[in-house]
Amino acid sequence: MTAYDKLAAHIAEYHDLLCILNTLKWDMRTMMPASGASSRGRQLATLTRHAKSIFVSDDTARLLDAAENEVASADSDSYRARALRQSRDAYEIQRRIPSDLVARMAALGAESEAVWAKAKDENDFVSFKPYLSQMLALNIELADAIGYEDHPFDALILQFEPGMTAARLHRIFAELKAGILPLLERIVAVEAPLVVDLWEAEYDLAAQKQLCRELTALIGFDYDRGRLDSAPHPFEISFTRDDVRITTRYDANYLPMSLFAALHEAGHGLYEQNIAPKLTRTALTADFLGQYAVGGASYGAHEFSSRLWENQIGRSREFWRRHFGRLQAAFPQQMAAADAEYFYQAVNRVRPSLIRVEADEVTYNLHIMLRTEIEMALLEGAIAVDDLPDVWNAKIQEYLGLTPPDDRRGVLQDVHWSFGGFGNFPTYTIGNIMAAQVLAAAHKQMPDLAAQLADGDYQKLLTWLTENIYRHGRAYRADELLARVTGESLNTAALLAYLENKYSDLYGVN
Ligand code: ZN
């Protein structure tokens, strides 16, 4: 056995533990009774500690040294060399993080997530506050342990989006605001009321589920290697490329909720299912630093895939021209007064709203900026947890002109802070930006792509994405992937052009 193979076997074992942790998390968010939260928290903490002790160990240090000596002369661009670099980078960062801190975060996270769910239900920020304060303190400890030059946020986002910094995000956000706010102003000024309100009707949940399955299978999600369940906060999680779980949630009146969450999570699932088989159980599918064992390049890169399939494909006029018949077959009465164009307009209605996960494509990134700016200010100590509801309400007023009637629809709406996911929110906006850049490149490279998408044929796009992005797993950083595929670095031009074209046409505000 070569030194590299010995390291690979060691990493594979660690990888297995990460996937078992994922199984526990999947169960926690789909099946587990709420009463299980505290014992599940201890189970997660125990297993997390064991996993970490395998990775941050003298064994790993020795195996890494030996493998590096052996691979030194090999092609520096090979998967082998890249896996080695990933392992080394992760090891150097992981060993700075005390394992008792990891365990404390895991234990608090499970309990805090349960407290948050109840607090949200009961509109009771005060009961969640001590947990959030502790979680913030742990995140500050984590940032200090990882280390940073300019901003604690830089250390935390490293877990999700290596290469991104608070300073870079400030620049990106400024560009986005400059493009989005004037567009939104033009749209809101002309918005005509909908003639029929499709979301007053009732949509049978079993029929919704069937439709979610149909549409996700249509874009290529492989149900022989995955499944769809329901969860109050939809997510995708994978145990390897051969077992990918997606979830959605159902509202009897609001059909778009289940459909677009399913397409979104299936977009994540497509990434995982199309990673090259030879990368399974290697460093190139292990998320050594993040919290979900994501196999893709980064969280932003993962979000590029979910948003591309949910929005740029799933919310396109072509998609519903092609598939409106399915919708009508499932819901003949509810859709009696609608046609494809009407449905397209209804699911692309732009209006400032309170809830991030229901936000349209134009306002969505404003919700992300608000959260990210608040996180940065919390980490800086510029605002206190006590002030959060007020700060939140002031910011949403500033960006969207709205005042939340309660904290449930304000500061309590997202799960992320409860389990400690600080640094994670901007990956959604990075995903939106990447999706626009990548799809523009795909159209440039495949002039017949538009015609195929209009025909409801998604195979060519899926193959191209697999070839250029998915199959590589974590071998390339998001920046490297973008440069390889588009020749550009992350920039907002394609996203702003996409929004401008789509919505100035929809609202006649050229
Ligand atoms: Zn997502």
Image: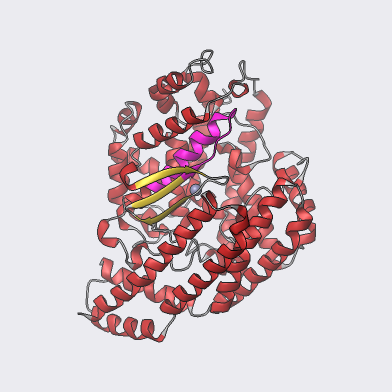
* Residue 442, image x, y percentages: 34, 41
The quarter of the picture where the N terminus appears is bottom left
As rendered, which of 75 and 52 lies closer to the eye?
Answer: 52
Q: Is 166 left, or right, of 301 in this rendering? A: right
Q: Is residue 195 above or below residue 495?
A: above
* Residue 367, image x, y percentages: 63, 46
Q: How is the image coloured?
A: secondary structure
Q: Is 141 left, or right, of 93 in this rendering? A: right
**Magenta span: chief secondary structure:** helix
Can residue 303 be found in the magenta stretch? no
Give the quarter of the image for residue 298: bottom left
**Residue 215 in view of the camera:** yes
**Residue 305 in view of the camera:** no
Give the quarter of the image for residue 473: bottom left
Q: Is 498 left, or right, of 185 in this rendering? A: left
The quarter of the picture where the C terminus appears is top right
* Residue 114, image x, y percentages: 64, 56
Query: Image point 70% across, 68% down: which residue?
Result: 134
As rendered, which of 133 and 492 lies closer to the eye?
Answer: 133
Q: Is 316 left, or right, of 109 in this rendering? A: left
User: Magenta segment range?
Assistant: 247-269
Query: Image point 30% across, 30% down: which residue?
Result: 452
Give the quarter of the image for residue 280: bottom left
* Residue 416, image x, y percentages: 60, 55
Query: Image point 28% across, 37% down: which residue?
Result: 459
Q: Residue furthest top?
A: 337
Can residue 260 be found in the magenta stretch? yes
Q: Is residue 167 above or below residue 405?
A: below
How many numbered markers are drawn?
A: 0
